[in-house]
Image (cartoon, rainbow, N blue to C red):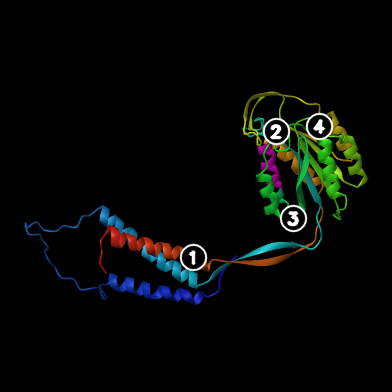
Amino acid sequence: MIDFMNPVAFLFFIPVLLLFLLRKAKIFSSPAFPAILSDWGGSAFKWKGGFFKFISAIKTALFLAGYVLVVLAFSDPVIHHDQKVYVSRGNDVLFVLDVSPSMAARDMDGLTRLEAAKQVIRFLAEQNTGASFGLVQTATEAALSVPPTTDRKTFIEHIDTMTVGTLGEGTAIGTGLSTAVYHLASSKAPEKCIILITDGENNAGSIHPETAASLAFEYGIKLYTVGLGTRGNVPLQYTDPVTGKVFNGYLESDFDPAPLQKIALMTDGRYFSAETVAGLSAALNNISNREKVVQTYYLKTVDEYFYDKILIAAAIAFALAWILSRIVLKEVF
């Protein structure tokens, strides 16, 4: 809701309106005397119409806009927002995202698999304000990028900066899951879950995925798995972040979903297959609805002021009007 803290400022519109009406009625206007200007050759000076009339109209409009903005700024407009402040904790969701080179395969509606995952995760995080989101990246090795947090800006910044190949060329699913379990084990959240998004099978690391799933079940952590991408020959291109070498070609995409289904069921979770962005979005929304926690909150009114922004806009309008007047129209005050 918009409000004006100093509405009396709008009275400054009255003098301008009166001046306009008086000039229209020719009651208050500058005296004019006819004069013929000519050069030594006798040719009379003529006003170059068209372009200069157009520029003059723009100058006048900019000046009036600047005046309106100044009055608006002094009226001190403010927009009131209702912001949810949670007094109870939501669930912890830790994404384990495969960043092996195969995630650069471009078979998700024109996006790479990693780009599609980043897009859908970002949207989910923005919509679910009460939950805490974290991120583990996994390939040959695994690393925690963001612990579960309600700070959406930090979480999304880390999502946006992910690239393929930064942690090697393998897929250590067990290592990634065990890293996530380690960081969720001591959490006091009412619900905890891990969402694994991968396009391959476990082929690296010393920890078996089933071992990690057993640990998750022991600590009351649900595991959801998402198999990403299509099958067959798919185009792939990525730049090795270490060597700078560009890889370009086709990937024979195929993997057995059974291991992912098994580890999900071990924790009372579920396996999803996603071959499109819409399919991935539906899978993550399904998980979000399953893991939703009822939280108590109160509404806090947050005020957003525009005084300084409007004054800057007014200054720009006046500056442009002055430039048109002095430099283009060559007017002298």
| Distance in Å between CA atoms under marks 2 and 3 | 27 Å
Q: Is residue 144 left or right of residue 263?
A: left
Residue assigned mark 1:
310
The residue tagged 3 is 150
Report helix, strand or loop for mark 4.
loop
User: Which circle marks residue 130 in the picture?
Assistant: none
Judging by the rendered image, the residue that carries numbered circle 2 is: 103
Amino acid type shown at disc 1: Ile
Q: Quadrant location of the C terminus?
A: bottom left
Q: Report, in whole angstroms, how far the alpha carbon at label 2 lies from the one at label 1.
A: 46 Å
Q: Are marks 2 and 1 in contact (CB under 8 Å)?
A: no
Q: Which residue is mark 4?
A: 204
Q: Position of residue 6 (x, y in %)?
A: 52, 75
The amino acid pointed to by label 2 is Met
Pointers 4 and 2 in contact (C-beta within 8 Å): no
Reading the chain from its start, which is encountered first: label 4 or label 3? 3
What's the amino acid at mark 3? Thr
Screen quadrant of the N terminus: bottom right
